[in-house]
Each structure stands twice: as structure tokens, then as C-alpha cells.
Amino acid sequence: MDISLLNPALAIVSIALGAVGWLAPGYTMQVIDLHPGKTPMGKSEVRAASGALFVGMGIGALTLGGPAAYAMIGFCWGGAAIGRLTSIIVDGSTPKKLGFFACEAAVATVALLGNLGQV
């Protein structure tokens, strides 16, 4: 498949998943096995780092539209995959962690391999 068709799809997936984290942090915390603490900082962190950050990244890529912008999606998802892999190695593996890692690594690979050669 042509990367020019996949690029907007990767940006939209980033926006959609980010919107869930941003606008439904309680649900997101449930899915990723986090529990609210004594302060609202947990939800704040989910809204920011698992939510609006990905919304901004996707909107930025769609706005700029070039290969470098879509490669940046790959770098961001790749960073998430590296963090997840670190957790798998250091903190222990679970099926959920492996699934999240596989998705993060797949998005990163497609975005980077499809766009870096065009930058």
C-alpha cells in the first residue's frame, strides 16, 4: 500500500486514541491498569501524556503534511515502544504490555520506514 494513504490514517489513529486518553482519562486508566491517587495528578498525566500529546502530534502531521511530519509520528510511537519494552524487561511482562508494545512498534515501523527515505 502507498504510504501517502497510510500517513493520514496513522495520524487519525493517533488523534482518535489520544482523544480517548484526553477526554476519558478514567476509562483510559482502567484499560491500562492505573488507579487514581489522592490527588488528580494521575488523570492529569493521562490527559496530557496519553491523550492530548497524541492529538497534537496527529493534527500537526496532518497540518504540515510532509514526510518529516509523518516520520515524527513514527519517532513518537517508537519512543512509546522503547518505554514499553523497557518496562517489559525491567518490570516484567504481561500479555497487555506485549500487545501495546506490538501496536506501538508497528505504527513506528510503518511511519519511519515509509517516510524517512523521503525526508
Image (tube, rainbow, N blue to C red):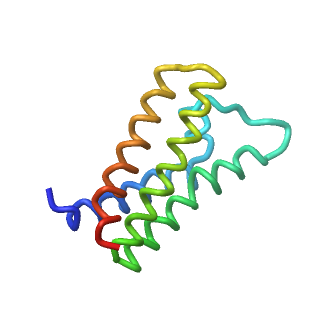
Residue 25 position (above or below residue 101): below
Residue at the image point whose x is 56% and y is 54% from the top? 51
Q: Position of residue 117 (x, y in %)?
A: 30, 66
Locate the C terminus and report the quarter of the image it occupies: bottom left
In the shown orientation, is residue 2 left or right of residue 38? left
The picture places residue 22, in percent across and down from the top left corner, at 58, 55
Instruction: Look at 44% across and 71% down and name the residue there.
Output: 59
Please count the marks in the image. 0
Quarter of the image for residue 38 reads top right
The quadrant in which residue 93 appears is top right
Q: Given the current orientation, which residue lies at the most extreme left position? A: 1
Q: Residue furthest right?
A: 38
User: Residue reaching furthest bottom?
Assistant: 64
Q: Is residue 11 above or below residue 68?
A: above
Query: Which of the pair 21/111 is nearer the observer?
Result: 111
Q: Residue at x 46, y 35 (%)?
A: 101
The residue at the point 22 percent across, 62 percent down is: 3
| Quadrant of the snapshot with the N terminus | bottom left
Judged left or right of residue 10, residue 19 is right
In the figure, is residue 112 to the left or right of 97?
left
Residue 52 spot, x, y in % from top left: 57, 60
Please identify the quarter of the rendering in which residue 63 is found.
Answer: bottom left
Looking at the picture, how far across and down is residue 54, in whole percent?
A: 51, 59
